């Protein structure tokens, strides 16, 4: 069973084609077997009896004609196509049945060559054998074995002679004008029909699998954070599946809208109490109490800002896309961190302009989150590099901390995921990497966690370039 599964194609379209073609071939084989059976039965019961009766009638008719007139009678009756052989059976002819076996034993040292493939005699041998068995008046039928296909029918003989090959008159009928049972045009017609059936099967499988392919593409877009509705099409089952998918998108969109509303409303509601807490802290005369409260309020404010940033980053309608030259923009962002005294370095390995369609504010939030995470949870310096891949710009943010193990990297990208308890004491709610991943996917790109060359964590953001820049060759920086 496992071997059979391994031989089956993986795609539904290929399986439908294989099933349809296999069904057609099985039906053709069954039809061929049925036709062959009834054809053989007809040959044995009807055609043989009819031919035997005709031969008996012809033999009786020739018996009434004088011997010297028989040859002329045969030529005139057949329009000069048949002739009468009044001698022994030629050496290039063979009797079928028991007489044939005796002759083969007699001529085993020099057997005659068999007929070439496609010769009509290959199809008549069974018929001649059945005819010889049916004839009970001493008449025999033989086939030639030479290059010219002929059939020999014995007519008159001396009754005391047992050897049927001698002292007989043989009616010689050429077979070169008889077409084979399955002619080449028939085979071409059959192959053409099979080709049309195969095209029909391909169109049928495409009609069924096309809605499923569109649905799979829509599911991939949903997983990438870019949901898109599908047009229900195809059979009723695939139409229902498309309608259910669209209903699921509507439910998810409604749930996402409720979630964004809750996340956006909670920070907004917390701003008032936080502001009042700041005022009350300033009215307290105890410096130790003031310092502790300031730290707690700052952590709460940081959490509120993370909630607000995540809500904005996960809302596709909040993005404002515009043309952006990535190299110059990234250098400007890193310079702002360097001017503030942060250990952040920038390395640009590609000097050609990299233009893309992006939201500057969202990309700035992505970069700030990654740099902040690296400074708070890893070891400086933070190294930022810009490189290219085919059709993509690659931003790498690397630190020198302990990094994240490979088996926990997928968990780190989930919202509200905190890989260590220390982050709860720094005001982190586990939204930094999730927000960066959402922003990258909203730009049609991706975010991946990897290991830095010198140890630590390397975050790689791939963003699609404009078509003109994606096709342009790389120009290395001058030495």
Image (spheres, rainbow, N blue to C red):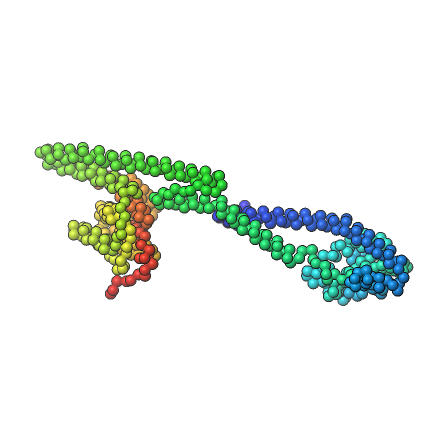
- Picture quadrant of residue 83: bottom right
Residue 249 location, quadrant: top left
Image coordinates of residue 42 in percent, x first then y, are 74, 49
Q: At 76% across and 51% down in the image, what residue appears? A: 47
Position of 431 with respect to 152 (left or right) is left
| Residue name at image x 22 percent, y 33 percent | 269
Q: Which is more toward the observer, 352 or 77?
A: 77
Q: Classify the position of the N terminus by image quarter.
A: top right
Q: Is residue 214 left or right of residue 27?
A: left
| Residue at image location 80% in from the left, 58% down from the top | 141
In x, y percent, where is residue 151?
Answer: 77, 60
- Report the number of numbered marks: 0
Above or below residue 431? Residue 149 is below
Left or right: 6, with 246 as reference point: right
**In the rendered view, would you say 316 is above or below 172?**
above
Position of residue 113 measured from the top left corner of the image (x, y, whole percent): 73, 65
Examine the rendering and report whether any part of residue 133 can be seen: no
Image x and y of residue 170, in percent: 83, 61
Q: Quadrant of residue 229?
A: top left
Using the rendered image of the protein, determine whether residue 185 is visible from the camera's viewpoint. Answer: yes
Left or right: residue 223 versus residue 92 is left
| Residue found at x 27% / y 48% | 321
> The C terminus appears in which quarter of the rendering?
bottom left
Q: Residue furthest right?
A: 160
Q: Nearer the viewer, residue 382 or 461?
A: 461
């Amino acid at each position: 069973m496992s071997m059979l599964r391994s031989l089956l194609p993986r795609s539904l379209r290929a399986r439908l084609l294989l099933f349809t073609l296999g069904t057609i071939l099985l039906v053709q084989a069954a039809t061929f077997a049925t036709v062959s059976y009834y054809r053989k039965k007809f040959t044995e019961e009807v055609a043989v009896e009819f031919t035997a009766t005709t031969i008996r009638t012809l033999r009786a008719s020739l018996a009434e004609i004088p011997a010297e007139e028989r040859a002329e009678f045969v030529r005139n009756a057949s329009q000069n196509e048949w002739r009468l052989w009044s001698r022994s059976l030629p050496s290039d002819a063979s009797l079928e049945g028991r007489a044939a076996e005796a002759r083969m034993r007699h001529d085993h040292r020099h057997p005659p060559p068999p007929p070439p493939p496609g010769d009509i005699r290959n199809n008549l041998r069974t018929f001649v054998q059945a005819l010889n068995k049916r004839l009970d008046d001493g008449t025999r039928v033989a086939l030639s074995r030479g290059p010219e296909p002929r059939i020999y029918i014995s007519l008159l003989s001396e009754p005391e002679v047992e050897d049927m090959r001698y002292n007989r008159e043989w009616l010689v009928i050429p077979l070169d004008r008889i077409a084979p049972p399955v002619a080449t045009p028939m085979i071409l017609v059959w192959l053409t029909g099979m080709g049309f059936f195969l095209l029909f099967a391909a169109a049928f499988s495409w009609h069924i699998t096309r809605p499923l392919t569109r649905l799979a593409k829509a599911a991939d877009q949903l997983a990438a954070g870019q949901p898109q509705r599908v047009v229900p099409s195809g059979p009723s089952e695939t139409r229902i599946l498309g309608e259910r998918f669209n209903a699921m998108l509507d439910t998810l969109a409604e749930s996402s809208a409720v979630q964004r509303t809750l996340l956006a409303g909670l920070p907004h509601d917390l701003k008032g109490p936080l502001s009042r807490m700041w005022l009350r802290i300033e009215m307290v005369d105890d410096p130790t109490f003031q310092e502790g409260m300031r730290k707690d309020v700052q952590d709460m404010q940081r959490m509120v800002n993370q909630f607000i940033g995540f809500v904005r980053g996960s809302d596709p309608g909040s993005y404002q896309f515009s043309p952006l030259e990535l190299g110059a923009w990234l250098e400007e962002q890193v310079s702002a961190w360097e001017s503030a005294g942060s250990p952040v370095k920038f390395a640009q390995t590609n000097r050609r302009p990299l233009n893309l369609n992006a939201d500057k504010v969202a990309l700035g939030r992505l970069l700030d989150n990654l740099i902040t995470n690296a400074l708070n949870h890893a070891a400086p310096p933070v190294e930022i590099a810009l490189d290219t891949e085919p059709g993509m710009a690659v931003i790498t943010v690397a630190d020198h901390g302990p990094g994240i193990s490979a088996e926990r990297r997928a968990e780190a990208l989930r919202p509200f995921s905190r890989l260590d308890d220390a982050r709860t004491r720094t005001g982190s709610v586990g939204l930094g990497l999730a927000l960066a991943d959402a922003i990258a996917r909203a730009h049609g790109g991706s975010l991946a966690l990897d290991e830095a060359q010198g140890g630590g964590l390397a975050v790689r953001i791939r963003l699609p370039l404009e078509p003109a820049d994606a096709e342009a060759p790389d120009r290395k920086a001058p030495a």
